Amino acid sequence: MLESLSIKNFVIVDQLELNFESGFTSLTGETGAGKSILIGALSLALGSRSETGIVRNGCDKSEISASFNVLNNHNANEWLNDNDMDSDGDLLLRRVIFLDGKSKAYINGSSATINQLRELGELLVDIYSQNSHHSLLKTSTQRDILDNFSHLKNNADLVKDLYKKWYKLFLEHQNFEKNREAYRLELDELTEKLSQYQALEFSLENWESIQQQHKTLNNRTEIVEGTQKILAILNSEESLAINEQLSDLNGHLSDLVKLDDSLNIHVKTLEVATVELEEMGRELTRYAQSLEDNYELQKEIEDKIQLTFDFLRKYRLNPDELVEASQLWQERIIHLSEILGESGIEVALNKAKIDYDKAALELSKLRAAASKNLSNEITNKLKQLSFTHGKFVVNLKAIEASQFGNEQAEFLISTYLGAEPKPIQKVASGGELSRISLAIRVCSVMDANVPSMIFDEVDVGIGGGVAEIVGKLLKSLGDSNDRQIFVITHLPQVAAQSRFHFKVSKTQVNKQTISNIEQLSEQTRIDEIARMLGGVEITETTKEHAKELLS
């Protein structure tokens, strides 16, 4: 809701700081006092187009700020989130207009575009007047009003979700048809690639192992020669072999042990060393023989390494990337096989379209019934607002399948007997449009998306009993703690129904006309209603009449 409005140096406004509450608020004052200026200032804060001539004489810029409580405004909070703008329930819109008509916009202190200000503003305030944008003239608003009136939001959301699912598959199918042959070629290539990979029997552990084997076999000659030298030392015939020397050492130590038992530990050490050297000799002999006989193994390992290197080079991969890449190939092969198969994307596309058509048809039936009910209710309200022969029609125009269903709601009206109903923006004048808007909102307000509404010129061409009805309808609109209704009126019957009453006036200060606005007390409100009833000369009778209207 609109909580406050600050205006500086705007047309004939010097400086105003206004605070508002929920409910029905009226603004009154003599013609030319500046009531429409307030609407103009707020409209600029909500993103309307700026122009030259609105900065007060003697000043270099105008500033308008409007603060809102958006804690319960789901649409506004969603917009703020989508645009990466923070909000803790408080929202400040600010507009600075310069002498040349150029301006700057801010949302919660951050610079914003005028378009962003306008988009957000449409979620905060609806202004119904001859010179202001009417959200009710937008086809999207008319559709939402019909769906909200008949509690069809869940049906409409389901249709939207099913349409998006179907349309996504539709685009994928189009892309598939365009690239069917390319998909087949890709599948063949991936299948061949995966087959080559599987033939390698590749794993990082095996890869490291065969590389080590290859290194050993490549150095076979040096290893064999070195092994033979070791064996020669162990089993030398020309000089005393190590084993024989160890045997002699063991004999000498055994003799000494007879003299000193403590030396027996060294005997055991020699025994262990003798056994281990004999085992080492046998192992080295077998190892050397295996190397001499492994030419075929070397060729096999070299071929496997070469195949792996060729594969890696062909597909520009490193060994540590190969396992993960093979998993991706397998996943892609499965996906391509599915969409190329009989149970692929075409089946999913057909099912999605059937689901959408079913939900859209159900929504169409519900909208058809709802449109008749809403048409009758609004027509009856129009008759109360002096449209004696007025007729309101919610027309459903067939459209191509869309996220909004198979039809578009269109508000039509005829204002005199025998006239053919036409779109409301083509038929109604400014004042009539405000009253039509009032009738529509009274019938659909329970689910209205915009919490603050301003009606200007709603009393044009009416008076007496109709004026009282207008006032009561506006009051009923404002009977909610989370909704605000503002009306600019010249009719005391309308103003008297409001919960809050502001008076707009103008004075001369330093040879300049200044517009002022004040919230009226109980007594000053009686005086203002009396003025509206009796004109320049206010009598006690007029005041009594004013009190009666306010009671």
Image (tube, helix red, strand yellow):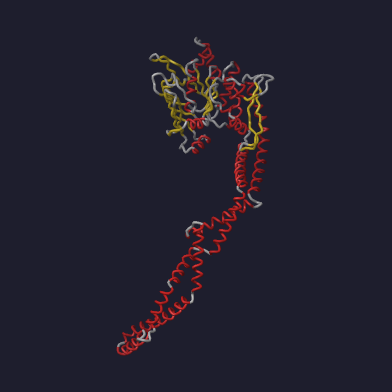
| Residue at the far left in the pictured view | 259
In which quadrant is the C terminus drawn? Answer: top right
Q: Residue at x 50, y 70 (%)?
A: 299
**Which x, y percent locates residue 232?**
39, 82
**Which x, y percent locates residue 245?**
35, 86
Quarter-wise, where is residue 152 in the image? top right
Does 258 appear above or below 446?
Answer: below
**Which x, y percent locates residue 219?**
42, 72
In this picture, residue 413 sits left or right of residue 205 = right
Does 150 appear above or below 517?
Answer: below
Does 379 appear above or below 83?
Answer: above
Quarter-wise, where is residue 265 in the image? bottom left
Residue placed most toward the observer, 84 or 526: 84
In this picture, residue 482 sits left or right of residue 353 = left
Residue placed most toward the observer, 392 or 162: 162
| Residue at the far right in the pictured view | 418
Residue placed most toward the observer, 153 or 301: 301
Does 73 appear above or below 392?
Answer: below
**Which x, y percent locates residue 485?**
53, 26
Q: Disc count in the image?
A: 0
